[in-house]
Image (cartoon, rainbow, N blue to C red):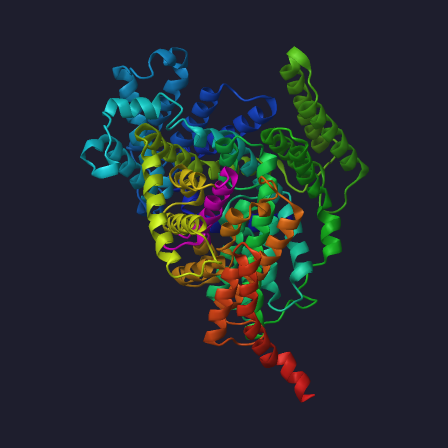
Amino acid sequence: MTEARERDMRDLQELEEKFDPEMRFRPTLPPASVIVKWLLVILSGFHYYTAGFGLLRETTHRGVHLAFVLGLIFLVFAAFKSDADTTVSKSRLSIGGVPLVDWLLGLACAASVMYIPYVFDDLAFRVGNPDTLDVVMGSILFITLLEATRRSMGWPLPLIALGFTAYALAGPYFPGLLKHAGASWSQMINHQYLTSQGIYGVAVGVVATYVFHFVLFGVLATRIGLGQLFLDIASTVAGRYAGGPAKVSVFGSAMFGMLSGSSVANAVTVGSLTIPAMIRVGYRREFAGAVEAASSTGGQITPPVLGAAAFLMVEFLNVSYQTIIAAAIVPAFMHFFGVFMQVHFEAKRYGLRGLTDEEMPKLRESFVQRWPTLIPLVLLITILVSGRTPYLAAFTGITSCMIVGLTTTVWGNRSTNWLLLVVLHVLLALVAFVDWGSDGETIKLGFLALGVALIWAGQKWLGVIGRIDNAVLLEAFETGAKYALAVGAAAATVGIVIGVVTLTGVGFKISFIITGWAQMIAAFLMDWLPAFMADAKSLTLLAALFMTGIVCILMGCGIPTTANYIIMVTVAAPTLVQLGVEPLVAHFFVFYYGVLADITPPVALAAYAAAGMAGSDPFKTGNMAFRLGLAKALVPFVFVFSPSLLLVAKGFTWADFAITFTGCVLGIVALAAALSGYLMAEMKRWERTLCALGALCLIAPGLKISLLGVAFMLPVLIHQWTMSPSRKRATLA
């Protein structure tokens, strides 16, 4: 059974590496493969240690993280895709299949990163007046960073960074409002390299602290079987109903999303079980893959472990992570509810069955086998809610995953297993929650060493067998670090964009341009719309929101969610704030649309991964996934006009929340019906049109316009009721 499980894990990993370019490592031979493996493990170990025992000085911590990440990228990602797909071969100009030039690039990149922590004490005297060595080292990092990002993520993000750089250098040559004084290369490097406004900015800091820790937690929680328990629960809840496997996909992705902020990992893990089941009951291959892809993207906005953008939001807004978790609850629900409704209507339209009793998992048996895997998640959520730091919560969750995985097995746990589980969690509590004074770090390390010794003694002398072994634990640390490579490079590259914005002030100029266009559109609409529907201020804001949403979607065609969010927050969010939108709401608006990046062709990573498992056309699957994601595309507008939906926004009242939530749910149902062409029966074109108009009105703020939405929907509901199959059967009877 263990061998089968390990084989399944290897298969899933291969799938993920095949369809996710951020995980597509080139083949290597010793000593390169051994060096890479242990560098990845050391990187995870570094972050695990600092999460529990204290972060290093900010610049040093970010430098160590970035040096490992960028250096490793040159070792594990080939310069060209074709090189990664070829069989590894030995040569004099390579070490273990890695060309000598890549070793040199990795070392040069790491050295240029660590240069800043090395000269940190003198940095205050050099900012604004860099010497020749500063400029040389900064230039090396700038060039190698763009190359590392290109290798791990493709061309779009480096090209955007180069475009912004060109704007900073050629400022005097731009026309009109975009014109600025310009910057020399030395000034550019000074701002991007020697300050915290560029490459070493907030984005890298967040990845090096919050993001890495939670990614590692998600990997370990999956390895010990928590993800499988969630899937079994999802199957029990939704599997029996029409189109059961697709609804299991939605529920399963929502629950797995609590552990993983990666859309691709979510799609591969959940989709490996749900996509074949969907195809078996009659779903088209493109639709089966699209359902899983659209569902999996919601993992990035599902508490308690959200995607990297959520942690960035903590830093940008200077709010607690608990606030972000609370604000994300309703948006996450709306995302999955929107996909669920389209799945339901599709299933009803084609008469697709649910799972049979033989296909249903035995939930009682699954819970008996896997209930200990809930302990790490419960601990993590409890600590987060208590107000402690997110990285302490992650440290506790990671350690608890290791304890549960190494001390308990699926069947046949003895009293020794339970005793060891309890004792090790007591030691964990002593490390995580007790202040031991000036010698605290030494004492905590002693407790950690004692815990390791107890596990070793239990395995060696007491015959304790866990649900994972030491090799799987090591693999989880390696895989967790793999996830950090591309996102780390992306965060540093986006720092270049942010640096240009702060250096040139272009963000304010873009805000002015967007506001001007929004006012023109609002003036045009005022001439055509009745006065009771909207005023000039609301229409101006609405136009600005539409433009921001469209740009987010277009940006998502080429770059992933995190990079999309950072760029749009830097450029567009100030515009929304200027128009009166609360900062938290503005950030969530951009974040919500940024999630669509993973299902927006042509770069739709989650959709391509799902298409690979479904055996469907990737582009058609991506288009279908994007359509499924549109069912909740209007929800961010509700956040803006009725912030109560975010629970923690200013002016929250339960009455406003209830009205807005009800209207939003009804609007999503109406829009899902319009997009799928089915409500209670096949819909005609006029019915789909009225449903779409009704959805727009139901989601819009205000009682009058909501009643107008109901009025649009009434003819559709009456006609659908008369045409529904159940009504016809009742009439015949």
Q: Which quarter of the rendering shows the C terminus?
A: bottom right
Residue 617 left/right relative to 156: right
Between 462 and 433, the one nearer to me in the picture? 433
Q: Residue at x 36, y 51 (%)?
A: 554
**Residue 195 pos. (x, y %):** 37, 22
Give the magenta part as a residue range.
Answer: 581-606
Outermost residue toward the left in this view: 173
Residue lying farthest bottom?
A: 732
Identified at 42% across, 61% down, the residue is 529
Residue appearing at x 59%, y 52% in the figure:
333
Q: Does any portion of residue 38 appear in the rendered image?
A: no
Instruction: Out of 600 and 607, give the one closest to the viewer.
Output: 600
Q: Position of residue 709 (x, y in %)?
A: 54, 64
* Residue 713 falls inside the magenta stretch: no
Where is residue 718 shown, x and y percent of the image?
59, 76
> Is 142 above or below relative to 152?
above
SS majority, magenta:
helix
The answer to which image quadrant residue 620 occupies is: bottom left
User: Left or right of 218: which side holds 437?
Assistant: right
Pinpoint residue 396: horizontal percent, then vertical percent.
65, 31
Residue at the extreme front of the image, as rendered: 531
What residue lies at 46% left-to-right and 70% top-to-bottom? 689
Say above or below: 156 vs 601: above
> Which quadrant would residue 425 be assigned to in this image?
top right
> Would you place residue 329 above or below residue 37 in this image?
below
Between residue 144 and residue 646, name the one nearer to us.
Answer: 646
- Say how many tags the image has: 0
Q: Is residue 582 magenta?
A: yes
Q: Is residue 554 above or below residue 282?
A: above
Tell me if I can see residue 616 in this picture. yes
